[in-house]
């Protein structure tokens, strides 16, 4: 499942995100969703979330629901 549709994302999910500083390299960071920051129903670059450790980035892949 991709991370471009807000309805697919729920707090507590394990996801792979790209942090702002990693956008050039595409380096993925794994974490658990705490807050969903994107208000629109979809976003072409991925829904922006805050992880439980405080890092913010756009979801590239949902690891598990």
Image: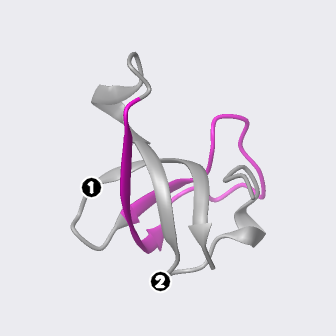
User: Which quadrant would the N terminus be assigned to in this image?
Assistant: bottom right
Residue interval drawn in magenta: 27-50
User: Which residue is at a point 72% across and 49% down the rendered structure image?
Assistant: 4
Q: Say whether disc 2 or disc 1 marks the residue closer to the N-terminus.
A: 2
Furthest residue toward front: 63
Residue located beneath label 1 in the image: 55
Q: Is residue 27 above or below residue 3?
A: above
Tag 1's secondary structure?
Answer: loop
Which residue occupies 51% across, 81% down?
Answer: 11
In this view, the residue farthest toward the left is 53
Cβ atoms at labels 2 and 1 below 8 Å apart: no
Looking at the image, which residue is at 41% across and 24% down? 23
Q: Report whether 52 appears left or right of 62.
A: left
Colour theme? one colour
Q: How far across and down, in percent of the image, does residue 36 sit? A: 52, 67
- The quadrant holding residue 64 is bottom right
49 with respect to 31 (left or right): right
Q: What is the number of the mark on residue 12?
A: 2
Horizontal and vertical percent for residue 6? 71, 63
Residue at 66% across, 53% down: 3
**Residue situated furthest top in the rendering:** 24
Above or below, 33 relative to 28: below
- Residue in front for this viewpoint, 58 or 27: 27
């Amino acid at each position: 499942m991709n991370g471009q549709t807000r309805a697919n994302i729920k707090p507590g999910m394990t996801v792979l995100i790209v942090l702002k500083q990693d956008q050039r390299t595409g380096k993925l960071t794994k974490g658990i969703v705490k807050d969903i920051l994107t208000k629109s129903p979809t976003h072409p670059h991925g829904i922006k979330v805050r992880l439980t450790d405080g890092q913010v980035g756009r979801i590239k892949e949902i690891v598990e629901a």
